[in-house]
Image (tube, rainbow, N blue to C red):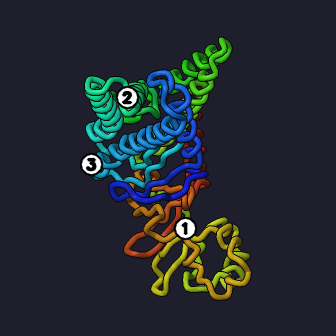
Amino acid sequence: MNGSVRVGRVVGVPLRMHWSVPLLVVLFAYGLGRETLPLWTPGRSDAVYALAGVVGAALLMGSLLLHETAHAATARWKKIDVEDVTLWALGGMTRMGRPQTAAAAFLVAVSGPLTSLVIGGAAVGAAIGLHALSGWSVPAVVLVWLGWANLFLGVFNLLPAVPLDGGRVVQALLWWRTGDRERADLAASRSGQVMGVLLVAVGWISVLRGAASGLWLVFVGLFIMLAAASERRRTTLDTALRGVRVADAMSSPVATGADWLTAQRFIDEVAVKSHHSALPLLDFEGRPSGIVQLRRLAAVPGARRESLRVREVATPLSQCAVAAPDELLSAALDKIRLSTGMRILVVEAGQLVGIVTGKDISRLMQRHTLRLGDGG
């Protein structure tokens, strides 16, 4: 996700944090420390409220991380590639490949909300125990707040709207019931669009009635609408590409460059003569080693271009989308990553034999539209 930075790893995959997370922590800490705690446990000092607010907000972000970690761990258990986990203003997002069975899709989808519900129940239970021992102490109120926040998160995520987890659950159940993945995806994306419109409407009505919190619902609803529309476009694409092999879409031969060249020599001998914004690289033995984007080359300071090898600013092959010529194109598209954009390197017997770009996909879609127009 744009605007996020890598901060570590969780269950073996990169963990990223969006710039909105610190702002979210501040808002949660302020609401808990300035409003909730003084109302439930009056008479404490401002320092106690502030510290408890920060601790509560940090615990909530930790529980959001556990929610996404459950998705990632379940996906890896079911042999699904997980690219990364990102925390951001609306909670979190786990980027992964597509499940190959309805059962795997269901387990991955339901694992996050179940984790939140378990955390919520445990926190509320612990708060009740503390209350029985010492009354409404500050730790007890923080736990109640944390518990109800997680219970709300778990229930809200089970709404039947893609990209929420509940939408994924519906998607998996329809897939299992009908045996038609595309049909299930289309139905789930439609439900997401409807739910998004309803949330925007409810949020806007709340704003008109003076409730500023309605803006949050409007924002969430718009996000769901956009994400559901994206899912619907992807489903349409999968339907159009059904049965199409990578070899049917790839462009060949491929313009390439040597990865051992210095950045300056690569610019002079390869980049300025190319009509592409990114170029695959080959090593000494002629095997593909990655992709270099020209904008990254342009960002290299002039003083370093004579000593820096082009492979040092390239995306290595391990982080590129790679497919075999006889692989299904729809499966290959699942491997695409933001770091390399809409590009799939086609490799056979260790040699680069072609490349699939966004233009190639667009050309296939146009042919599919023409066939539909001809009644074919």
**Amino acid type of the residue tagged 3 in the rendering:** Lys
Total of numbered circles in the picture?
A: 3
Would you identify the image quadrant in which residue 71 lies?
A: top left
Residue 252 - label: 1
Residue 137 - label: 2
**Residue 46, position as x, y percentages in the image:** 54, 35
**Residue 214, position as x, y percentages in the image:** 60, 21
| Residue holding disc 3 | 78
Would you identify the image quadrant in which residue 55 lies?
A: top left
Q: Residues within 10 Å of mark 3 (few under 14, many from 20)?
A: some
Q: CA distance from mark 1 to mark 2?
A: 70 Å
Q: Nearer the viewer, mark 3 or mark 2?
A: 2
- Which secondary structure, mark 2? loop
Upstream in sequence: badge 1 or badge 2: 2
**Residue 127, position as x, y percentages in the image:** 31, 28
Query: Answer yes or no: do the residues labelled 1 and 2 have beta carbons within 8 Å?
Result: no
Q: Residue at the location (49% across, 55% down)? A: 336
**Amino acid type of the residue tagged 2 in the rendering:** Ser
Q: Left of 374 or right of it: where is 247?
A: left
**Residue 321, position as x, y percentages in the image:** 46, 61
Q: Nearer the viewer, residue 330 or 148?
A: 148
Q: Residue at the location (68% across, 83% down)? A: 305
**Amino acid type of the residue tagged 1 in the rendering:** Ser
Q: Nearer the viewer, residue 271 or 84?
A: 84
- The answer to whether any part of residue 167 appears in the image is no
Q: CA distance from mark 1 to mark 3?
A: 35 Å
Upstream in sequence: badge 1 or badge 3: 3
